[in-house]
Amino acid sequence: MDGNSIKKHEALSHDAIVQALFENYESIYAVDAETSAYKCFHESDSYSSLHLKGQGNSFFNALDEEAIQAVYFEDRDFVRYMLSKEALSSGLSKERFYSFVYRLMIDGQPLYHKLRATMGLVEGRPHFLIGIRNVDAAFRQDKALAEKLSSMHNKELNHLEAILASAEGYLEANLTKDLILEYSPYKLPAALPASFHDSAKEGTLSYSAFEKWHVEHLVAENKEKYKKISDRNYLINCYEHGEKRASASFSMRMMDGQLQPCKIVFYLYHDTSTGDILSFCVLYDLTEQQRKEKELRDLENALQMSRLRNFTSQMQPHFLYNALGSIQEIVLEDPAYASELIGDFTIHLRSCIRAMANDAPIPFEQELANIKAYVNIEKMRFGDKLTVLYDIQKRDFSILPLSVQPIVENAIRHGIYERGEEGGVVTIKTAEREGNVLITVEDNGVGFDVEAYQMAISSGEKDSTGLKNIMFRLDRMMNASVDIQSCIGVGTNVTIAIPREKQINESNYSR
């Protein structure tokens, strides 16, 4: 291949990489951290309609003089502050990534965009690398879910009042004299004897007799709990020990044989004139409450899954930039190898993009292809220091996208890489045992103290958002569990167990 052909191949490869990498970004800027000179490397069709300068001597002056006009007027002061050189430098001195959400005016409409910045080297000089992505649809959906969830939580503040207003029946009893003072027949169609109604009218209805019959004939589930809580002596003892309330949830058998979820609450007090201990007992139908609680849980899960889908779409800039730089170096030395790496790079990017669009389970073979592509890119950098073995005994099952590859990445970066020149081995296995499909990622890296690590996470010293999200997704959508075993100086073993008969939890996943 002559020099012109190599240069042409390099340009085409670079264009292909940029197109694949920034397919979901509106624009990409590199800003010299020292001189503030900048250049825009990518613009989408919608972003180019803003007619902003593609390069210049001062990014921050251009922002204040020109680009700020493209920002929605309510967000301009916020953007000026957040994207000042001082704020950008300060933010990146504390964290690897610096990001915020604001609105750009696109075709006359304010659309939410997310700016994400990091530091990197361009031609040997430190640069702010800034990407801008359209997140309007996801942000508005997340915002709407959050607002609805907040509204439901506010309604919960009035929940007790709402339940009191919907009481299905009540009675007032003198526990000391074992006598029902006032009795309201149930709204629920329970089969109470007429003698109870007559005795209540005459004021001779025994509380103990009423509750005994109630336990024997109407209470169908949680009978022992109900029997204990409703016992006259138990309630008197509660009041004498300073407890003014007792309650129990149970199921009542209706006349038609159906079971009705209920809750009974005993409010305890005493008659100041006689000193007798009394109880005001209220019966509630829990059907509507349970429906609302399920709706709230479903909404919380939907909000969490929305955030997780957004999380899985976040490609890691440090890996992508490092990979781009390494491939660029290889293009001139070994174009054929560089071409293979570009293919692997494209497979990995497509997996990230697919996960952003849809978190639905995929055939394991697709996740495995992504793993192998990622490993090939890492081996370009690690060379012989990294060995990856595959023991794939089971293939015909589904897995969530980007659920195994990040675990392999952790094994390489936090296990093998820390061994230095000695390097190490990562083994990926699949098998089926006792009704579960098992996916295991083993490494002989440096290992870590699992218990100490979990304590650091609980105290806030460490962040494990990525691993927790993987575990949450696998649990909610596939009923799968994740087990982590590690020993310092020996290595780490992470095993995913997926029930073979019920891989997908249909109640927590919708296409």
Image (cartoon, rainbow, N blue to C red):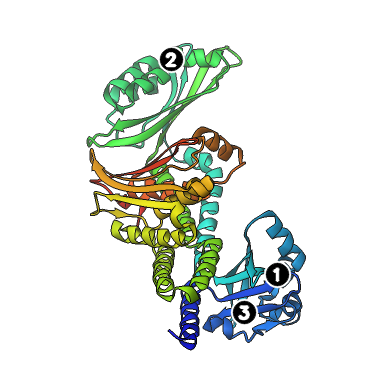
- Residue at 47% of width from left, 16% of height from top? 235
Quadrant in which the C terminus is drawn? bottom left
For the point 71% across and 65% down, which residue is it?
82
Amino acid type, callout 2: Arg
Q: Residue at x 52, y 49 (%)?
A: 421
Question: Earlier along the polypeptide chain: callout 3 or callout 2?
Answer: 3
Q: Which residue is mark 3?
A: 40
Assess disc 2: are there few (<14), some (14-19) or many (≥20) residues with their C-alpha within 10 Å of its C-alpha.
many
Residue that numbered label 1 is attached to? 79
User: Circle 1 — which element?
Assistant: helix
Q: Which callout, 3 or 1, points at the residue further toward the start of the chain? A: 3
Query: Tag 3: Cα neighbours inside 10 Å, few (<14), some, or many (≥20)?
Result: some
Can residue 177 be seen here? The reply is yes
Which residue lies at the image location 41% right of the left edge and 74% below the top edge? Answer: 339
Q: In the shown orientation, is residue 267 left or right of residue 359?
A: right
Disc 3 residue type? Cys
Asked if residue 406 shows in the view, the reply is no
In-front residue for pair 141/247: 141
| Distance from the alpha carbon under mark 3 to that under mark 1 | 18 Å
The residue identified by callout 2 is 232
Question: Which mark identifies residue 372?
Answer: none
For the N terminus, the quadrant is bottom left
Badge 2 element: helix
Horizontal and vertical percent position of residue 177: 46, 11
| Nearest the eye: 217 or 100 | 100
First in sequence, mark 2 or 1: give its number: 1
Position in image of residue 157 (x %, y %): 56, 43
Residue 185 lies in quadrant: top left
Q: Are marks 2 and 1 in contact (CB under 8 Å)?
A: no
Q: Position of residue 447 (x, y in %)?
A: 49, 39
